[in-house]
Amino acid sequence: MKNKPLKKADIFIVLGVAALALLFIFLRGSKSERRIAVITVDSAVTDRIDLDEVKEKITIMPDTDPQVVIAAENGEIYFESSGCRDKICVKSGRLSKAGDIAVCLPAKTVVSITGSGPDAVTY
Amino acid sequence: MGKKRPVTIILALVCAAALASGAVYGALSKEYTGSFTAMDTYNTVKVRGADAKKALSSVSEITSELDTALLSRHSDTSAVNEINLNRGGRIPEELAPYLDTLFEVYEKSGGAFDFTLGTLTDLWGIGTENERVPSDDEIKKALALTGADKLDYTDGKIKFPEGISLDFGAAGKGIALDEIEKEFGREKISRAVVSLGGSIMLYGSGEFTVGIKDPRSAGYMAVLTLGDCFVSTSGNYERYFEKDGVRYHHILDPGTGYPVNSGLAGVTVIAPGGTLSDALSTACFVLGREKGETLCKEFGCEAVFVYEDGGVYATDGVKDSLEITDDYYRAEGVK
């Protein structure tokens, strides 16, 4: 029942597995911290925008009726204009944090930011 | 070699059991998510458990069915529309317990929550193509056609004078959440978060986090950590129109007939039921912080009051569960 001393190869294997585990955790962690804006139209994803990569203002005009114009700049994304009547989507303002969401019901368009946010937002 | 065999077999069995339990755990812990539109809002579902996949569809079915068959006063096929047209009728059995709750909130709030504002709401038309600022005289006339105290509700039947219009718009999503909770009780659901247009049901064990919408932007300004419960918010920042520089929002004061002007931007209520949380959040928004807090205490509920100037007041039961995440806002004591 005597414990056998660890061989060098065993130590390398253990260290290798530990390094891989740490790398995996780091990659998963860094992935979840990125703020990805997801645009869906009629439940289908049409655009994914890495908000941390947006340097200059970009505008997106998905194929919707009424037409909506979505803009991203300075790490934020928002409905810039909409042909809908109540403009609730435009009034929603700018999204910047994981969990933020803005919706244009008439255009069936949802803009949300993925990542680690709260389970839900009450409004 | 012979002595090692039982150990090898046991190890193999342990590994197999671990793999099998891992697979079962994986299946049960998998979160299913979905979204749908109903009740004129965008709704989301996150659900775990053996019946999670089935629950996704049952949530949207229950919500749509309740809206079109029971609650919407704009649906030709709904019970409420028929009752309004006939100035009364039999209250459907499934609606009766919720109507009892609404009557109770109406009475205890002194009419601050009123589910008979249909005529007044139509007059303002906020969020519709007919939105406008009515004259004082028009508002006075519409107010005369409101008030749940004018309803005669006995033996499951309701009667009321011509011109009154039942409107469950302020509590419809909460009623749907209560029905969804009943359905989850019949299914194998371990954990779920259902949001019907911002009215939320937190179902199952463990802690949940709920962001409170920032009245000034699309994000959230604070996060509540809660157990299983229902959370509703009433605010003046989403449905409104502006005329001559004045903002007219959709929460009307049953006392004045005008949009509420209490200095509050929003009130979030935490309650054991969806109908209750929906009705109380409207009542609290109308009543203001002091009376709203008293009302919540009567029902054993908690609330967070967000002022337009950035002040945030949480009742004792959620004070420690609230984390303000936006620098514009600050926790305050009693104003």
Image (cartoon, coloured by chain):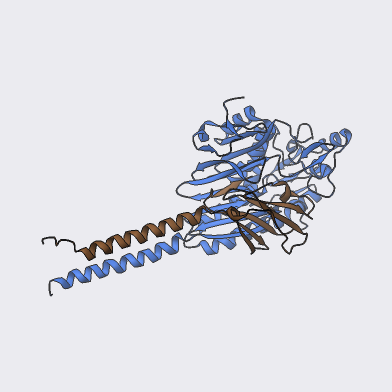
* Figure colour of chain A: brown
Q: Residue furthest left?
A: A2
Q: Is residue B278 left or right of A85 when viewed as pictured?
A: left
> Residue drawn 69% across and 53% down?
A57
Which quadrant of the figure contains the C terminus of chain B?
Answer: top right
Q: Which of B307 and B62 is in front in this view?
A: B307
> Residue drawn 75% across and 41% down?
B250
Q: Nearer the viewer, residue B243 or B165?
A: B243
The image quadrant of residue A38 is: bottom right
Q: Which of B285 and A115 is in front in this view?
A: A115
Q: Which x, y percent locates residue B245?
A: 82, 36
Whether residue A61 is visible, yes or no, is yes
Q: Which x, y percent locates residue B125?
A: 81, 45
Q: Which of B158 and B243 is in front in this view?
A: B243
Q: How many marks?
A: 0
> Residue drawn 83% across and 45% down?
B131
Chain identifier of the blue chain? B
Q: Is residue B195 left or right of B208 when viewed as pictured?
A: right
Q: Which x, y percent locates residue A86?
A: 77, 50
